[in-house]
Amino acid sequence: MWVTVGGEQYQDGDIGMEQLLAHVGEGFSTSGPAPGELAQAAEAADEGDGVVILTISRRMSAVYDAARVAASSLEANKVAVVDTGTAAGAQGLVVLAASRTARTGAALDDVVAAATAAAGRAKLVATLPSLAHLARGGRVPGAAAWGAQWLGLNPVFEYRGGKVRPLRPARGRRAALQRVFGAWERDSTVARAALHVAALHALEPATAEDLLARVTARVRPTSAFVGSFSPVMVAHTGPGLVGLAWWWEPDAGA
């Protein structure tokens, strides 16, 4: 991904968070990799048995379309493109599911099936201290951001159906984090299933770690990690986002 801020273009990861936040008030834009970049990455990754490209939701980014163009240009290679329908930590969980299957030596179609199954079950719920950065980027109306701040509300949202959907906001940070945890808790009664979970954050690692600890105190997950937002993501959300992403993998005997 790319971010243009302060008149300069940077590839995601090549700009530090402090530098980004210092200049984001000057205006910014973000964009996905070009088809040529994706084709080059696919060729470098291919060890002879094909490549699966897993993209952020096509309803939020043009990366999926760029990946399809890249795949069609690699006639000598077998390349599959999967729209994960999600983003951030939930996308990371889908990538890990595909990777686990790939490491068993499974065929490319089986890796695609594993990714698709995880993507269909992945959920993400998060909270922000304010909507200011989302309003600046055009993701929500400025009046909504001002109103939420005036009322002392912390926005809570979920990533569902390929897009961000607002949930009932909370009064204060603690209540918002409880609402995030509560969303996972209500979904934690799945019988005979393995939990895959990620705590995600934008410059709030300690809060994310605490949130994950609350989950692992209830259930021993099969896989778990804390993941930081990248500069491109923080450019849109601003600092302070914390959330949970998870999916339940049904027991093969269930």
Image (spheres, rainbow, N blue to C red):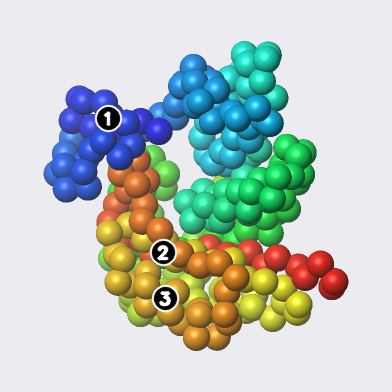
**Helix, strand or loop at mark 3:** helix
Picture coordinates of residue 113 (x, y %)?
A: 75, 46
The disc, 3 or 2, on the residue closer to the chain's N-terminal end is 3
Q: Are marks 3 and 2 in contact (CB under 8 Å)?
A: no
Q: Neighbour class for label 2 at 10 Å: few (<14), some, many (≥20)? A: some
Q: State the residue in front, 26 or 149.
A: 26
Residue drawn at the location 44% of the way across and 29% of the way down: 32
Q: Is residue 66 left or right of residue 174?
A: right
Q: Is residue 46 above or below residue 146?
A: above
Examine the rendering and report whether any part of residue 59 can be seen.
Answer: no
Specify the label residue 211 is tagged with.
3
Secondary structure beneath dot 2 equals strand
Q: Which residue is mark 1?
A: 10
Mark 3 and mark 1 lie on one chain; the one further toward the N terminus is 1
Instruction: Give the left or right position of residue 184, taking residue 201 as reference.
Output: right
Residue visible at 57% across and 80% down in the picture = 220
Q: What secondary structure is found at the residue carrying circle 1?
A: strand
| Marks 3 and 2, how far apart at CA | 10 Å
- Farthest right residue? 253
As drawn, the label of residue 226 is 2
Measured as percent of width and height from the top left, residue 237 is found at 35, 51
Amino acid tagged 3:
Leu
Which residue type carries mark 1? Answer: Tyr
Of label 1 and label 2, which has the lower sequence position? 1
Q: Residue at x 58, y 20 (%)?
A: 70
Report, in whole angstroms, how far the alpha carbon at label 3 lies from the one at label 1.
32 Å
